[in-house]
């Protein structure tokens, strides 16, 4: 099971793989440790989810928001 289960967006996997390859080639000390890679993926997933949430929230009329 990959770490992309955190986000639930299958298209996000290619971006995670790209950053994983980038880290492995150019930022070796962080990519060598599995825990650091998983932490990196988790942080990227949080940023991605936050941007999606903000995008969706901006389209919902104020009257339909639960207060």
Image (spheres, rainbow, N blue to C red):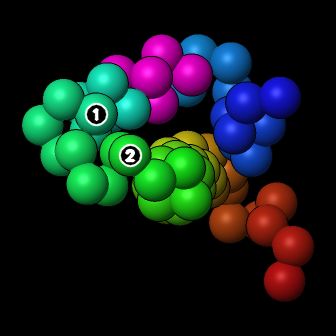
Residue 24 is labelled as 1
Alpha-carbon distance for marks 1 and 2?
7 Å
Q: Residues within 10 Å of mark 1 (few under 14, many from 20)?
A: some
Q: Is residue 33 left or right of residue 11?
A: left
Q: Is residue 55 magenta?
A: no
Disc 1 + disc 2, Cβ < 8 Å: yes
Residue 18 visible in the current orientation: yes
Q: Is residue 14 magenta?
A: yes
Q: Is residue 33 left or right of residue 9?
A: left
Q: Position of residue 52 (x, y in %)?
A: 55, 45
Query: Furthest-bottom residue in view?
Result: 67
- Point out the image quarter for the C terminus: bottom right
Q: Is residue 19 left or right of residue 54?
A: left
Q: Earlier in the sequence, mark 1 or mark 2?
A: 1
> Which residue does the image show at 82% across and 60% down from the upper left?
64
Q: Position of residue 54 (x, y in %)?
A: 53, 56
Q: Position of residue 50 (x, y in %)?
A: 54, 58
Residue 55 visible in the current orientation: no
- Point out the image quarter for the N terminus: top right
Depicted 26 relative to depicted 44: above or below: above
Q: Which residues are magenta?
A: 13-18
> Which residue does the image show at 57% across and 22% down from the upper left?
13
């Amino acid at each position: 099971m990959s770490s992309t289960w955190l986000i639930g967006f299958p298209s996000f996997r290619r971006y995670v793989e790209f950053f994983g390859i980038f880290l492995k080639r150019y930022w070796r000390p962080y990519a060598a440790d599995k825990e650091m890679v998983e932490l990196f993926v988790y942080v990227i997933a949080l940023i991605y989810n936050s941007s999606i949430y903000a995008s969706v929230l901006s389209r919902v009329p104020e009257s339909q928001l639960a207060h």
